[in-house]
């Protein structure tokens, strides 16, 4: 099998390459932009067949320079929800994806691509239906616009598999390069190791301090879903990828602090104890985020389950513990699954 992974040096893309390698697939064309040279670290130890800069790859792919490509795992995108340059966002996330889809259709290549839960915006229902979709930022709109193209493409009777995966809040190894857009789990670990405490947003939107809820999904589970679809070329559509459980930012902070304490051979504490001891503290909700913030997300997994994917997603306590152990050097990135399967807001918390 010959595979292209775009965004291959990025967070999810590098974990996808690692997952392919574990399945014995190493004929992988890795595509990315390494202007940020430190991202190369995500590819260390991974087996790829070739590497191309994104500025070169897309035009050459359209021309057919790479011969037969079985599947394109399209993870490349601008995922910074605080970017307001609509022209850049639409060119990067929509037009590039649309040209790739057209080329894949012409050449008989399958496509599995990254969409986003940002397509839902501030709604209360998270089903893959137009009535639930109302993005709060241009990033979410850029993803939704491509999803709409894919829906029309599939309705016209696409010959090859096209799958869009709406990722909820993904966390896990190989995200350090993302800076402020890294997950809250990563930033909580960094804050606790640096300052001895974790900071969360206070009351907002009818939710008490730290009680805003998101569907936090561990990156290993995201990769498992991608590999599941890779093995089932007859399944197409747009699907949510989350745990199906909304958990609070308090849950993430508690799991992170207790995982760090466990590494230091200290006992776990309750949330009340962590707050009382000053290990978790709350800061005022930022004015610039009011009206632009998802206080609640929870993936509806009905479509994924109907397609036949019965993966059991790990909860925050389990996933965060594995992640903290990995960050501390207790596990290698991409191999964290068990055998049985500052008072300045973080952009990742704002996403």
Image: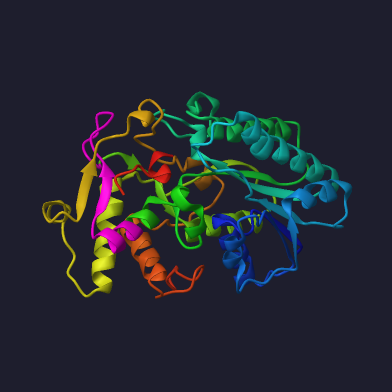
17 shown above or below 113 = below
Q: Position of residue 88 (x, y in %)?
A: 64, 35
Residue in front for this viewpoint, 186 or 322: 186
In the rendered structure, the answer to whether residue 57 lies left or right of residue 42 reads right
Magenta range: 189-210
Residue in front for this viewpoint, 285 or 154: 285
Residue in front for this viewpoint, 308 or 24: 24
22 shown above or below 103 = below
263 shown above or below 277 = below
Image quadrant occupied by the N terminus: bottom right
In the rendered structure, the answer to whether residue 2 lies left or right of residue 77 reads right
Image quadrant occupied by the C terminus: top left
219 shown above or below 119 = below
In the rendered structure, the answer to whether residue 347 lies left or right of residue 259 reads right
For the point 19% across and 56% down, the residue is: 279
Q: Position of residue 210 (x, y in %)?
A: 25, 42
**Residue 133 falls within the magenta-colored stretch:** no
Q: Position of residue 164 (x, y in %)?
A: 61, 43
Quadrant of residue 287 in the image? top left
Q: Position of residue 85 (x, y in %)?
A: 59, 31
**Residue 203 falls within the magenta-colored stretch:** yes
The reply to whether residue 84 is visible in this rendering is: yes
Quadrant of residue 124 in the image? top left
In the rendered structure, the answer to whether residue 262 lies left or right of residue 14 reads left
């Amino acid at each position: 099998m010959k595979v292209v992974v775009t965004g291959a040096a990025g967070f999810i893309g590098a974990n996808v390459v690692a997952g392919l390698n574990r399945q014995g697939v190493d004929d992988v064309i890795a595509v990315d932009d390494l202007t940020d040279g430190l991202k190369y670290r995500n590819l260390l130890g991974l087996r790829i067949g070739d590497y191309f800069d994104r500025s070169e790859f897309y035009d050459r792919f359209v021309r057919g320079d790479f011969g037969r490509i079985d599947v394109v795992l399209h993870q490349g995108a601008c995922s910074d929800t605080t970017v307001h340059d609509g022209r850049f966002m639409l060119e990067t996330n929509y037009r590039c994806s649309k040209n790739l889809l057209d080329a894949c259709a012409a050449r008989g290549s399958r496509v599995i691509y990254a969409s986003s839960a940002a397509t839902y915006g501030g709604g209360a229902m998270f089903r893959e239906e137009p009535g639930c979709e109302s993005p709060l930022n241009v990033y979410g709109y850029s993803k939704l616009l491509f999803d709409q193209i894919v829906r029309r493409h599939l309705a016209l009777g696409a010959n090859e598999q096209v799958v869009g995966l709406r990722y909820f809040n993904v966390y896990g190894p190989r995200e350090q390069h993302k800076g402020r857009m890294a997950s809250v789990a990563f930033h909580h670990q960094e804050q606790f190791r640096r300052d001895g405490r974790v900071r969360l947003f206070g009351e907002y939107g009818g939710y008490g301090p730290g009680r805003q809820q998101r569907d936090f999904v561990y990156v290993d589970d995201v990769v498992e879903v991608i590999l599941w679809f890779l093995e089932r070329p007859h399944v197409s559509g747009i699907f949510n990828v989350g745990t199906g459980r909304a958990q609070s930012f308090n849950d993430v902070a508690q799991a992170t602090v207790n995982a760090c304490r466990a590494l230091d051979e200290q006992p776990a504490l309750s949330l009340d104890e962590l707050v009382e001891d000053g290990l978790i503290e709350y800061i005022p909700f930022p004015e610039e985020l009011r009206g632009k913030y998802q206080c609640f997300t929870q993936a509806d997994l009905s479509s994924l389950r109907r397609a036949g994917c019965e993966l059991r997603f790990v909860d925050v306590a389990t996933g965060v513990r594995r992640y903290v152990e990995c960050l501390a050097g207790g596990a290698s990135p991409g191999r964290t699954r068990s055998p049985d399967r500052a008072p300045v807001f973080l952009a990742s918390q704002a996403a």
